[in-house]
Image (tube, rainbow, N blue to C red):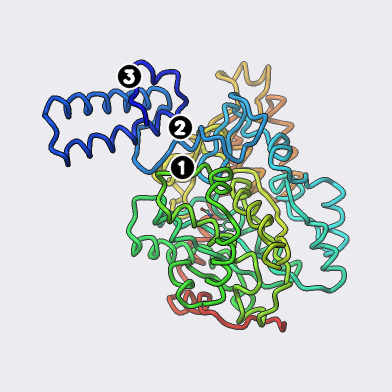
């Protein structure tokens, strides 16, 4: 790579800058190894520091070796994404809009389909169950091939569910429960097998964690997942670090996928660069493989044509676009998908939740008092500054985080509608809205904590043992 002079860098985009810093870092290391003259090394270090500074100014982030600026890489967001568009990939969700990401645009960009009234009605007709409020309220808003799954179900053809979690820390927050709450409902209404992947390998590769720690987080997260109420006779939960060594069939599928995806393809889909470790580059095959029934011979009796339905947050779609592309080439059906919107941080739908900031969400370990304080102190409000103004102009539910959380967790449609009207008109004040949320979350979390306490090591082991489930294939 050509030497850049200070000043040149400012016309570079963040990814180019990142590559310049990486290259300059390598140069400094080489000079030191060669024992080059001190002033030459000093000059190279100076340039490195100034490049790092430009990188920080341009991206707002510290340069970190091995972590390219994913927010800016021209990945899955495809052609037509402009500067003020939202950015969504498995590691970054970015929007400048307080209402959150524009999901209709995302459907167009990702090429998925909207979950419309017709599909929701069909789900109701086919299952005989009232659609879950996540469907009725557009929380699961996009899909791929859901009609195929319903056709299969009507024709008594089996399918199975697959979802997962990246165990990046011991603490899970309420947002992490969304896919599991919904998956549990799907499992109940369709009565199908479910596999849950814990990608402890992924978190080891992407985070500053030891493999032991990542596995330990996986086990702790499994307890929270089991506490959602899954049926042990119908559910298999596995950690990648463990199951890969137990299942040759799983590994065979991983290798088949790896043979059919090039480095260029994953660069295009995930924004990997030449300096990413090869573990990251090959990881997508590991998240793809559970979409194929032969990865679980004990459950599916080695049948290869059982279709898979994956409920997940929309940021996971890149993995499954890749999976759907590979599937027919290795003789498997394409998985179908149901996509959810993101769960907003307490500070607002345009900010990202982070497990390291305890105030950015409500954690499953929070006490009733912590829940109350966090909501009162940190939940971004769409209310007006003074009571007089609020009464006069009303609040804005579109940006109000307490209201958004109620759409996730308050099941009573009538009550939710009343709250919306009263808040919008100004009759209901922010403090009153927050009180309703506090009173909804406190018992919900307390119940979760009680259930989690009852999960024993034996139960974890049973869920995580490869075995036949209550279905004959
Ligand atoms: N990569 C996901 C995460 O970081 C975890 C995951 C693995 C997953 N397989 C999945 C999520 C299937 C949804 C569906 O959270």
Disc 3 packing (10 Å; few <14; some 14–19; many ≥20) = few
Give residue 198's position: percent from left, percent from top: 50, 63
Give residue 407's position: percent from left, percent from top: 67, 43
Picture quadrant of residue 212: bottom left
Query: Which mark sits nearer the N-terminus, 2 or 1?
Result: 2
How far apart, in angstroms, are the residues tagged by discs 2 and 1?
Answer: 9 Å
Query: Which mark sits nearer the N-terminus, 2 or 3?
Result: 3
Q: Assign a secondary structure to mark 2.
A: helix
Q: Is residue 46 above or below residue 259?
A: above
Q: Nearer the viewer, mark 1 or mark 3?
A: 3
| Discs 2, 1 touching: Cβ within 8 Å | yes
| Discs 2, 3 touching: Cβ within 8 Å | no
Q: Is residue 83 above or below residue 63?
A: above
Q: Which mark is residue 273?
A: 1
How far apart, in angstroms, are the residues tagged by discs 1 and 3?
Answer: 23 Å
Give the number of callouts. 3
**Where does label 2 land, which residue?**
15
Q: Assign a secondary structure to mark 1.
A: loop
**Where does label 3 land, which residue?**
5
Query: Which mark sits nearer the N-terminus, 1 or 3?
Result: 3
Give residue 136's position: percent from left, percent from top: 77, 48
Residue pictured at 59% horizontal, 46% vertical: 315
Residue pictured at 82% horizontal, 60% vertical: 148
């Amino acid at each position: 790579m050509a030497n850049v002079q200070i000043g040149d860098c400012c016309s570079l985009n963040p990814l180019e800058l990142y590559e310049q810093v990486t290259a300059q870092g390598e140069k400094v290391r080489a000079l030191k190894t060669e024992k080059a003259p001190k002033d030459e090394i000093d000059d190279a270090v100076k340039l490195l520091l100034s490049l790092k500074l430009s990188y920080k100014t341009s991206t707002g982030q510290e340069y970190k070796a091995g972590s390219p600026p994913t927010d800016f890489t021209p990945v899955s967001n495809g052609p037509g994404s402009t500067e003020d568009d939202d950015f969504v990939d498995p590691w970054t969700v970015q929007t400048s809009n307080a209402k959150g990401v524009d999901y209709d645009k995302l459907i167009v960009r990702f090429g998925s389909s909207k979950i419309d009234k017709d599909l929701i009605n069909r789900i109701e007709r086919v299952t005989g169950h009232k659609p879950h409020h996540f469907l009725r309220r557009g929380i699961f808003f996009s899909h791929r091939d859901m009609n195929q799954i319903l056709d299969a179900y009507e024709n008594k053809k089996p399918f199975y569910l697959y979802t997962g979690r990246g165990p990046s820390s011991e603490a899970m927050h309420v947002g992490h429960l969304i896919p599991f709450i919904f998956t549990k409902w799907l499992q109940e209404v369709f009565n199908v097998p479910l596999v849950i992947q814990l990608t402890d390998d992924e978190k080891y590769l992407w985070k500053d964690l030891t493999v032991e720690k990542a596995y330990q987080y996986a086990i702790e997260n499994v307890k929270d997942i089991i506490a959602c109420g899954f049926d042990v006779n119908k559910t298999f939960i596995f950690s990648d670090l463990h199951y890969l060594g137990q299942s040759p069939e799983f590994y065979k599928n991983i290798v088949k996928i790896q043979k059919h995806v090039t480095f260029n393809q994953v660069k295009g889909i995930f924004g990997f660069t030449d300096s990413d470790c090869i573990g990251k580059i090959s990881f997508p095959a590991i998240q793809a493989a559970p979409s194929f029934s032969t990865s679980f011979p004990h459950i599916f009796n080695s049948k290869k044509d059982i279709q898979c339905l994956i409920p997940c947050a929309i940021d996971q779609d890149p993995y499954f676009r890749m999976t759907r592309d590979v599937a027919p080439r290795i003789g498997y059906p394409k998985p179908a998908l149901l996509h959810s919107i993101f769960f907003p941080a307490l500070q607002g739908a345009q900010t990202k939740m982070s497990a390291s900031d305890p105030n950015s969400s409500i954690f499953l370990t929070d006490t009733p008092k912590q829940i109350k304080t966090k909501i009162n102190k940190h939940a971004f409000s769409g209310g007006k500054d003074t009571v007089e103004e609020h009464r006069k102009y009303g609040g804005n539910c579109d940006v109000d985080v307490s209201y958004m959380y109620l759409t996730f967790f308050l099941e009573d449609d009538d009550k939710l509608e009343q709250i919306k009207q009263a808040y919008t008109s100004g009759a209901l004040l922010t403090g009153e809205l927050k009180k309703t949320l506090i009173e909804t979350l406190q018992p919900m979390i307390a119940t979760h904590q009680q259930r989690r306490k009852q999960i024993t090591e034996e139960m974890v082991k049973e869920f995580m043992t490869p075995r036949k489930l209550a279905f004959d294939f």
